[in-house]
Amino acid sequence: MGSNKLTVRGKKAKIIIKDLNVFYRKKQVLENVNVVVDEKSLTCIVGPSGCGKSTLLMAINRLLDEIPHARMNGEIKIRLNNGEFRNVLDFKSYELPALRRKIGMVFQHPNVLPMSIIGNMAFSLKESLIN
């Protein structure tokens, strides 16, 4: 998995999740999750409320680090710009802002900034044009 030649179903993988487990205190909320996300593909995570969709996304971009008593193990590998795979669980704290810029998350409720969803989305676009 260390090269950019990893293909699954004839496509290059962009994200590989292997044996991911997530716990809140002693309660296990994700158990042995295995997922391959193809490069340049649309991937949907669908399920009922409370099944772990948001937890999975928060694990990928390491937002779970911000939740007290949350922990995870396994592998979440992403393909970097140089084509190599790296486990995001090994990222250092100073690398997390760059990771979170590449792996964003749209929350169900507009809780990032106190405005509408469209306002939150437009805010990031305005910021990127300014900087």
Image (tube, helix red, strand yellow):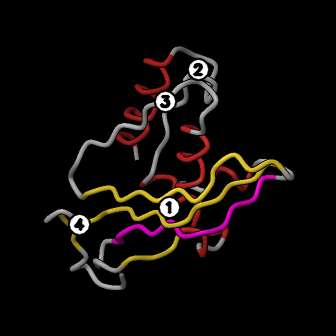
Q: Is residue 46 magenta?
A: no
Amino acid at circle 2: His
Q: Say if 120 sits above or below 93 in the image.
A: above
Snapshot quadrant of residue 32: bottom right
Secondary structure beneath dot 1 equals: helix
**Of callouts 1 and 4, the N-terminal one:** 4
**Of callouts 1 and 2, the N-terminal one:** 1
User: Residue at 28% across / 77% down in the picture?
Assistant: 83
Q: Which residue is mark 4?
A: 8
Amino acid at circle 4: Val
Question: In the orientation shown, which residue stands out farthest toward the bottom?
Answer: 2
Q: Which residue is mark 2?
A: 109
Amino acid at circle 3: Gly
Q: Quadrant of the N terminus?
A: bottom left
**Of callouts 3 and 1, the N-terminal one:** 3
Labelled pair 3, 2 in contact (Cβ < 8 Å): no
Q: Say if 5 sits above or below 34 in the image.
A: below
Q: Which residues are magenta?
A: 70-80
Q: Which residue is mark 3?
A: 47
Location of residue 78 in the rendering, given as x and y in whole percent from the top left corner: 41, 67
